Image (cartoon, rainbow, N blue to C red):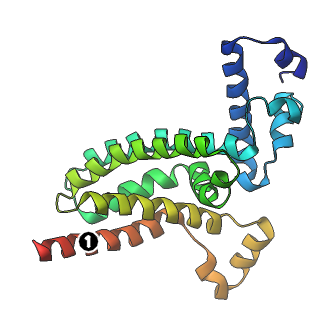
Amino acid sequence: MTTSRDFQRARSPEAKLVREAAILDAARRLGAERGIREVTLTDIAEAVGMHKSAMLRYFETREEIFLRLTAEGWRDWAPALAERLRAIEQPAPDAVAAAFAGTLAARPMFCDLLAQTPLNLERNVSVEKVREFKLTTGAGLGQIVPAVRAALPGLTEQDGVDLVAASTSMAGTFHQIATPGPEVAALYRSDPRFAHALVDVEPRLVRILGAMLRGLAGERAGSA
């Protein structure tokens, strides 16, 4: 573990980047282990050997740290999804739905962050940080939407934007439902009456997004 003394010695821009990377790495690790809601600024500070007040020189709030990680998640997910969409040999609504669902379900921490973003992460940071984040999501849309429209040519650009909004919102919500606390999870498994509360994120996303895309494709074909 890096000590607080080690952090105090560095003064250069390069050292500042190293500190920020260490903080983000700690937050990423703790978030994956515990879930985003359970990680405090103090937890992150302790993981990197810094006092919480010293960490505030690099990030104003815990929400800023996790918003940075959400932006990082978008930069990872968008090109991966676009590549998978371009690789579909026989484009169809269900294949596009499966690409969205598969790439999101493979990134559980990103799904967790997606749920927290509008509820918390965008609400305790500066307007400039929100602006930076929205530029990142906009760049992600710029990669995903053209790939969607290439796979399903009848869709409009707005259809593509709506699809991304629906998929990310549902992935975030379903992830929260699918990862209850141990006692609640045991309750759901113990009684068949609670079977509806057991959620498998990927197949549910495939079903819902597939239905959405089939409806959009049929609507666009009917208006052509």
At a point 71% along the width and 67% down the height, the residue shown is: 180
Indicate the position of residue 221 as horizontal and vertical percent values.
Answer: 14, 72
Above-or-below relation of 10 to 149: above
Q: Position of residue 102 (x, y in %)?
A: 43, 54
Image spot of residue 113 (x, y percent): 61, 52
Relative placement, left or right, of 152 versus 24 is: left
Up the image or down, 92 lies above or below 2; here it is: below
Q: Quadrant of the N terminus?
A: top right
Which x, y percent locates residue 111? 57, 55
List the single residue furthest toward the front.
127
Residue found at x 40% / y 56%: 100
The residue positioned 70% from the left and 84% from the top of the image is: 191
As rendered, which of 64 and 79 lies closer to the eye? 64
Is 160 or 77 nearer to us in this picture? 160
Q: Can see residue 169?
A: yes
**Any part of residue 69 in sight:** no
Q: Quadrant of residue 59?
A: top right
User: Mark 1: few, some, or many residues within 10 Å (few <14, many ≥20)?
Assistant: some
Return the residue at label 1.
Answer: 216
Query: Quick one: 2 or 88, which is closer to the camera?
Result: 2
Residue 223, quarter of the rendered image: bottom left
User: What is the three-letter code of the residue carrying label 1?
Assistant: Leu
112 sits to left or right of 89: right
State which quadrant residue 51 falls in: top right
Between 159 and 213, the residue placed more toward the observer is 159
The C terminus lies in quadrant: bottom left
